[in-house]
Amino acid sequence: MTTEALKGEILAALADAASPEAVEAVRVAALGKSGSITQLMKSLGRMDADERLRTAPLYQALRETVSAEIEAKKAALGRAALEARLAAERVDMSLPATPVEPGTVHPISQVMDELSEIFADLGFAVAEGPEIETDWHNFTALNIPPEHPARAMHDTFYARPEAGGERMVLRTHTSPVQIRTMMSQKPPIRIIAPGRVYRSDSDATHTPMFHQVEGLVIDRNIHLGHLKWTLETFVKAFFEVDDVTLRLRPSFFPFTEPSVEVDVGCSWEGGTLKVGGTASWLEILGAGMVHPRVIANCGLDPDEWQGFAFGCGIDRLAMLKYGMTDLRAFFDADLRWLKHFGFAALDVPTLSAGVGA
Ligand code: PHE
């Protein structure tokens, strides 16, 4: 067969090849180890010098042409495959996305984020503790010994006593986080501890599970003035009003001495509550100077370290700020209520953009 005839045959086969595999088969048949063109090239070695000089350029030209055609065909098939894929995977950006019902951030979570943002700006870290707590952390270490009448105020959920006689409780306040923090960190300490707490109590203003935020500062030379300033700064930032008056009333907690209950000045305008002024008062938290015995219970020297602590109901704060009337709605998981009072997921509270936005 002449080289021209062979070329015609191979190119015809190539033209028929419709897939990369078919092209590869043509390549192997022509240029593979025992392919037709490879055989021709091998036959050059058996020729005498004159004949080889005449024939070699013809064979080389044939090999080059065929290789080039095969490469071109491969590239063309590759492009066609890509085009087909692009066409198949085309996304119509003008179509509406699959509708996803957007969820909302629960007002409690929102308020917790707001609190963290405000106190982070004052240099407070966020601390956590377990909700199933030892009797010792929840009571004894906080200067509430087993037979102390203050235990009766807490309507505690007790777990069945364990083998060793120890009885776990659902924490009745976030104050045990004070103990855990003082025992695991070296002062100076500045923390807040938001979280769930439990008491056996249920009506329009009480739910068996509710939320508190604890605050704790332990340092040298801390006094009640620091507590008052911190609370005022917090309340102003939280309610976004400058005209805030706090009233500190003497009170009693076993773990603080002196103890105060703190009211925020407010007014009732047309049936709605407004924070600011001194027309009326609303209790928002309990606080005081950490009792020296509590500091000593945590292994610190009360002559060197003092501090203040406060505990505040988060649900109450949320109701005040966002105008909800029934606490129980917080826990009903009613989608209509959540849509109305919930916050957009991207509406992250920041001090610059406003914590109440
Ligand atoms: N733990 C108290 C309560 O739940 C609040 C409190 C915390 C009071 C810290 C003083 C200091 O009522």
Image: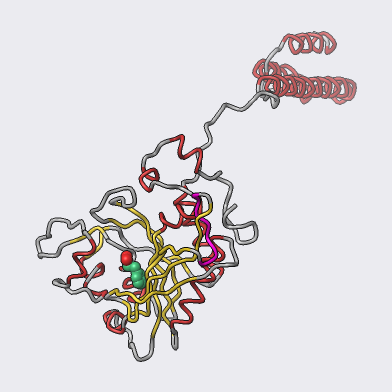
* Quarter of the rendered structure image containing ligand 1: bottom left
**Residue 183 at what x, y percent from top left?**
32, 76
Q: Which image quarter: residue 196?
A: bottom left
* Residue sitting nearer the eye, 246 or 329: 246
**Residue 115 at what x, y percent from top left?**
49, 61
Q: In this view, does 32 lie to the left or right of 178?
A: right
Is any atom of residue 106 visible in this view? yes
* Magenta span contains residue 160: no
Residue shown at 10%/64% (left/top)?
A: 165
Q: Which image quarter: residue 277?
A: bottom right
Q: Give the range drawn in magenta.
A: 271-278
Task: Name the image quarter holding the N terminus.
Answer: top right
Is any atom of residue 177 visible in this view? no
Q: Which image quarter: residue 37?
A: top right
Judging from the image, the colouring scheme is: secondary structure
* Residue sitting nearer the eye, 202 or 107: 202
